[in-house]
Amino acid sequence: MKLQNLSIKRKLMLITMLTSSVALLLSSASFLIYDLISFRHLLTQDLETQAQIIGYNSAAAMAFKDEPVATATLAALKAKEDIVAAVLYTPDGKIFAQYVPGDKAAPAVVPPKLYRTGYRFEGGYFDVLHDVTLNGEHVGTLLLRSDMREWSRRAKRYALIFFIFVFASGLFALLLSSKLQRMISRPILQLEDTIRIVSANKNYEIRAENTYGDEIGRLMDGFNNMLAEIQQRDTALLNANDQLHARTEELEREVAQRQQAQEELLKAKHAAEEASRAKSAFLANMSHELRTPLNAIIGYSEMLEEETRESGNTEAIQDLQKIQTAGKHLLSLINDVLDLSKIEAGKMTLHLEIFDVPPMIRQIVTTLEPAATKNSNVINVRVAEGVDSMRADITKVRQILVNLVSNACKFTDSGTISVNVEPITAEGQDWIRFEVCDTGIGITPKQRKQLFQEFAQADTSISRKYGGTGLGLAISHRFAQMMNGHIDVESEPGKGSTFTVLLPVEVKSEGQESPSSETTLEPAKPPRPGASNQDTILVIDDDATCRDLMSRSLNKLGLNVILTGSGEEGIELARRMRPFAITLDVLLPDRDGWSVLHELKTDPELSSIPVIMLTIIDNESLALSMGASNYLVKPLDRERLAVLIEKYRAGRSSKSPNRNSSNRTAEKREELAPTKA
Amino acid sequence: MPKILLVEDNEMNRDMLSRRLQRKGYAVVMAQDGEQGLEFARSESPDLILMDISLPKMDGWQVTRFLKSNPETKGIPVIALTAHALSTDRQKAFEIGCDDYDTKPVEFGRLSEKIEHLLVEKSVS
């Protein structure tokens, strides 16, 4: 065990013990040595004195050579225990007389020869040599030899006392140091304990108990300060943590609340949508239910009017006409409400087609001529050059214009209504501007603000005087917006109003890419070889006459026609040429049309091409279930075929508004479309 | 005297339209529902059919589809009459094979023009 690893307690004890032992040993030893030296000196003196006495007593005997007397004198030394030998030498160095205590052998202790005087320590003996004189004459030499018995005894005793003393004082020192070391070790151990508890329990509230003013006391103070600091930081950290926790909880609560609110909102939204749907459905239903009795009212009153006119009863005619007018007014209200509910429900869709503008304008004016003349108004129409065809929802364009012109007629008396149509270019796009000016009552700026809002006529007195729901302008406004256009109005009260409708020449359906203006204005061209497959149609029919007829009528539509009499070859051609549509006869020589249809519809590359089945066999449901887009029965209705083909062609690509074929169809449809007055 | 088949389930409308057509000089056959309409179209061989779309038993679209897929009745012009003034209806009417289309309440002047036009076209072809 290394010294430095010893505990403080042990180290302190060790230091105390070592220091005190060394000090004790040194002091005891020095005392011992001094005592022994002085004792020896005393012994020497004592021995010399004896030698003088013996020498004096034996001097006469020596001078007279009386040996027995000399020996007897020497024998007096018997009382001295430590004398081991006494010898008298003659001046020439020979033994004259000697004394040896009885228990010693003479030769062992008696030096045979004299060497010199004085005293000396030798071989554990102490020798004293003394000159024996008589009347100043040297008569011999006396040797006294002592074995230092007393000295050794004393030394032994001293040693014993010394060890006992050292042992006792060591014990005492141990006891004392073990008590006293606590003065230093206890505070340190106490501090150590405190540190251990603090670090084990992570409890920074504990403090080291300090009752000391020394360095350790200061160490403890420092430690306590450090603890206080840590505790303070710990508390601050805990507080921050608590705050963070609280904030987190708060946030979580907030998120939960928001989520709940969102769910509620979503529910409310669904409910509102559901209500809106229900409302729309109700309105659509109601309008249908209302139309049926209206049909009867208007019809019967018209019929009665005719009958009355024939019978010459002119009085009743006016009344019958009032019934008719009221009925028609009611009908227009229903139509408006239905339109508006559809717009609000988002169910109003655009049916874009290409049509010529001038005939539409003429038709509208013709329709509204009676309304104009009723208030003695004149309608002037001016269609600028360059106004040709446009691509839009014709029904909605017509409805907007009818609305504006009939409003103008309604609010003008004996005035002029001008309808101006001209092409303009703005914002990098081609537009058609329809302008309806009147010289009527006009509208104030305040009225203008709510003019395009639902159920808001310029003045409530107006509805009493002129009738109407106030929906017409709102609907027109919405329709114009749907076609990416807008309506504006300028007016001076009492002088008249000018309504301006701006619509794109080519209205784009949602998500449709804007075609470049070059393609938009591309003039009509006859079909040409190598035209893109957008203009290519495939005819699969085994009857040559039939193929010829199809080819001719489809060519007229500006299409590139591929003909084949075989089903196998038809599939091959479809893969190679990718036509935009296929007409397929059911009866074919090599395989039947159904299997051809099946193969076309199961090929992922060809399945998107619409197939029109042509047959003399009536099995439409089979055709449609197998994926045919349409089903026509021979002999073929060419108009219907043209309508279908135009539909698929329009679905495949956006076409120029000026194509002959498109115009033909559009015009045809325009004639057939109902006029909404 | 051209014969017109009027397929209409509403009694008042049927009565009113038939009387007005008769006054115009047409012979009128009336059917109350789709099935009857189909039956009369075959048995009476009318010159023209006025077809209401919302009909019980079989709707006007179905009847027209049957008529137009049958070579016997295919040549008879059909004018669809619907109370829904939707352009999708108009489109549907042409796709199904109707020769013309009009909305209810009927504007009689316009309807009789359409009838005459189709009868003339039919006699020419």
Image: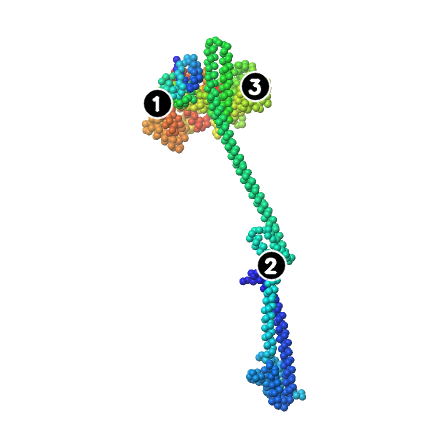
Residue A364 can be seen, yes or no: no
Residue placed furthest toward the left: A589
Instruction: From this view, report whether residue A381 is shown above or below residue A571.
Output: above
State the quadrant of the N terminus of chain A.
Answer: bottom right
Q: Earlier in the sequence, mark 2 or mark 3?
A: 2
Q: Chain of mark 3?
A: A
Residue A254: percent from left, percent from top? 55, 38
Label drawn at residue A462? 3
Residue placed furthest toward the top: A312
Looking at the rendered structure, the kind of residue marked 1 is Thr
Query: Residue at 47% of width from left, 14% of height from top?
Result: A301
Q: Earlier in the sequence, mark 1 or mark 3?
A: 3
Q: CA distance from mark 2 to mark 3?
A: 109 Å
The residue at which mark 2 appears reads as A186
Residue B42: percent from left, percent from top? 36, 19
Looking at the rendered structure, the kind of residue marked 3 is Ile
Q: Nearer the viewer, mark 2 or mark 3?
A: 2
The residue at which mark 1 appears reads as A545
User: Dot 3, how many residues are within 10 Å of its Cα: few (below 14), some (14-19), or many (20+)?
Assistant: few
